[in-house]
Image (spheres, rainbow, N blue to C red):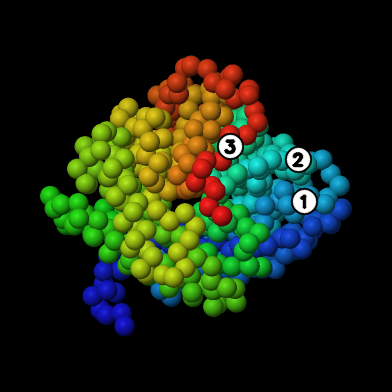
Amino acid sequence: MINTSEILQTLQMIDQQHLDIRTTTMGISLMDCAHTNPQEACRRIYDKICKRAEHLVAVGTEIEREFGIPIVNKRVSVTPISLVAAPSETEDYLCFAEALDKAAKAVGINFIGGFSALVQKGFTHSDRKLIRSIPQALATTDFVCSSVNIGSTKAGINMDAVAEMGRVIKETADLTAHREGFGCAKLVVFCNAVEDNPFMAGAFHGVGEAECVINVGISGPGVVHHALQQVKGEPFDVVAETIKKTAFRITRMGQLVAREASTRLGVPFGIVDLSLAPTPAVGDSVARILEEMGIEVCGTHGTTAALALLNDAVKKGGVMASNHVGGLSGAFIPVSEDEGMIAAAASGALTLDKLEAMTCVCSVGLDMIAVPGDTPAETLSAIIADEAAIGMVNSKTTAVRIIPAPGKVVGDLIEFGGLLGSAPVIPVHPFSSVDFIARGGRIPAPMQSLRN
């Protein structure tokens, strides 16, 4: 039974500490939409998304109004399009991206994810077609998000795909130069991608998922920050326990919304992703949580240890609150979307190397980072390879969402607005990785992959 005190606490978290449901994401299988005629396949895709997600936005709005819990985004994820489009007799997959975008607009959602390919062990012909289509697709659509999984602990790292994705990111930035490379904000390169992630830009509906599910991504950096202000000077045991209890309360709210949405939409409840997803709003920052633990500025010595504690405590608190925790679940560190990260990067305290170290212990990886527009494609590929190696060896999901901002240099600021925020352009190493990336082939899977 929920008591009055718990209700008041939740209201305070929503009203004063930026607590929200970051997204309700409907995952939809498109496997039955495949057809040799690409126009017919696209028609089926559009019709199925519109039918399945017809009431997604309306139900989300109803739940917001009835429960007083903000739901910031309503989204859809679909089966990786490289699989759905494979039978179609066409060399250009742009029409599939256009069908997704048209459907997203018809049902009124914020983003649609799944213009994706899984190439951790090699390419199919369809994978190559999709990857070639990514820059144009992200430049000409409004709501489509794309992801490519280039490695895994089981398969190793597909270095040919890593090289290709560096070039794809550069081309995407150039085609959206009038929007400061915005297309790259909708593109994620993964190692160990998960099938039930509700967060964009990396969400897709995995082939091991049900026909249709509802996944919910919650947030609450501001709530955790406020809780830690009550235990100033206490030992780290107390800090960890405080975060666990806070994550428990946040996750319970997320599960309530997920089950309610599932019931009203007549769709199975998938998972709650309890990631601490920040926003550019003051008071809603993961960086400020780390600083509350005693770090003067996020990025200085001790930051990685503080983030490790935060990530672990969030997971432990969340799994006690729900039997269906999934997705990425931990602490996100997207630079442009976190007010404290933006300030730390602008001051020079938070560097690319430090961010890479932090990704060893947090959820996902190098996220929403702006680098100079003249950064070579091979350097971008090498950054992806480094991050994939961390994920592969540590059996965790890592990713890169990086923006080589056209015409921008170190110290400039790029502005995306809304939840995507703004990012100071930070330096990359000036030394070449060309010969490393040119080798191609596959970095073998580590010993820990041999678990059978």
Residue at image mark 2: 129
Question: How dense is the environment of label 1, judged by Cα within 10 Å: few (below 14), some, or many (20 and up)?
Answer: many
Identify the residue at horizontal 59%, vertical 68% (top origin): 213
Q: Position of residue 225 (x, y in %)?
A: 26, 53
Residue at image mark 1: 85
Residue 285 in sight from this viewpoint: no
Q: Position of residue 207 (x, y in %)?
A: 66, 59
Disc sitting over residue 444 in the figure: 3
Q: Quadrant of residue 300?
A: top left
Q: Position of residue 395 (x, y in %)?
A: 48, 47
> Most extreme residue toward the bottom, as rendered?
1
* Label 3 – label 2 distance at C-alpha: 25 Å
Q: Amino acid at mark 2?
A: Lys
SS for callout 1: loop
Mark sitting earlier along the chain (3/2): 2
**Relative vertical location of residue 266 with respect to residue 246 in this rendering, above or below:** below
